[in-house]
Amino acid sequence: MAIHKKEIFSRKEQDLAAFAKAIAHPARIAILKVLAEKNECICGEIVEILPLAQSTVSQHLKELKDAGLINGSIDGPRSCYCINWEAFELFNSEFSGLFKSLQIDQAKKCC
């Protein structure tokens, strides 16, 4: 039985990688900035602000929602989204811990 290579890594490492992948597109970062400014947004408003097609914005919103970085609700033809700040706090803490541990390791041995 074959195993996926990512399964050899810890859950924390997999989650950090998934988070990084979710925000690794400039359009998603722009969407997050819009949502942070408005604190809640309708998909149509995001489309009006960004130079992207509605279908492209929807795909990026889906990726962010699947990663748990935004929450969304559908009310008829409207889709409302907002940032999941709890998820951001968690990943901020995890990334800070990762960067600190990497700096400590680098200080011990430098080429």
Image: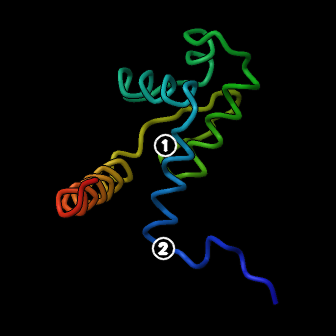
Q: Residue at x 24, y 63 (%)?
A: 105
Could you say which quadrant of the image residue 57 lies in? top right
Of 9 and 72, the residue lying toward us: 9
Question: Measured from the top left, where is residue 84 in percent x and y?
Answer: 41, 46
The mark total stands at 2
Model colouring:
rainbow
Label 2 sits on a secondary structure element that is helix
Residue type at the position of mark 1: Ile
Nearest the viewer among 59 and 71 is 59
Picture coordinates of residue 55, whole percent (x, y): 76, 25
Residue at left 56%, top 46%? 21
Q: Is residue 18 above or below residue 69?
A: below
**Residue highlighted by disc 1:** 70
Quadrant containing the N terminus in the rendered view:
bottom right
Instruction: Give the farthest residue toward the right.
Output: 1
Label 1 neighbour load within 10 Å: few <14, some 14-19, many 20+: many
In the rendered image, the residue lying farthest to the bottom is 1
Identity of the residue drawn at 38% across and 22% down = 38
Compute the Cα span from label 2 to label 1.
21 Å
**What residue sits 49% from the left and 62% below the top?**
15
Amino acid type at circle 2 is Arg
Counting residues from the start of the chain, the first of labels 2 and 1 encountered is: 2
Residue 49, position as x, y percentages in the image: 55, 10
Looking at the rendered structure, which numbered label has been put on residue 11? 2
Nearer the viewer's eye, disc 2 or disc 1?
Answer: 2
91 on left or right of 49: left
What secondary structure is found at the residue carrying circle 1? strand
Question: In the displayed structure, does residue 9 sit left or right of residue 102?
Answer: right
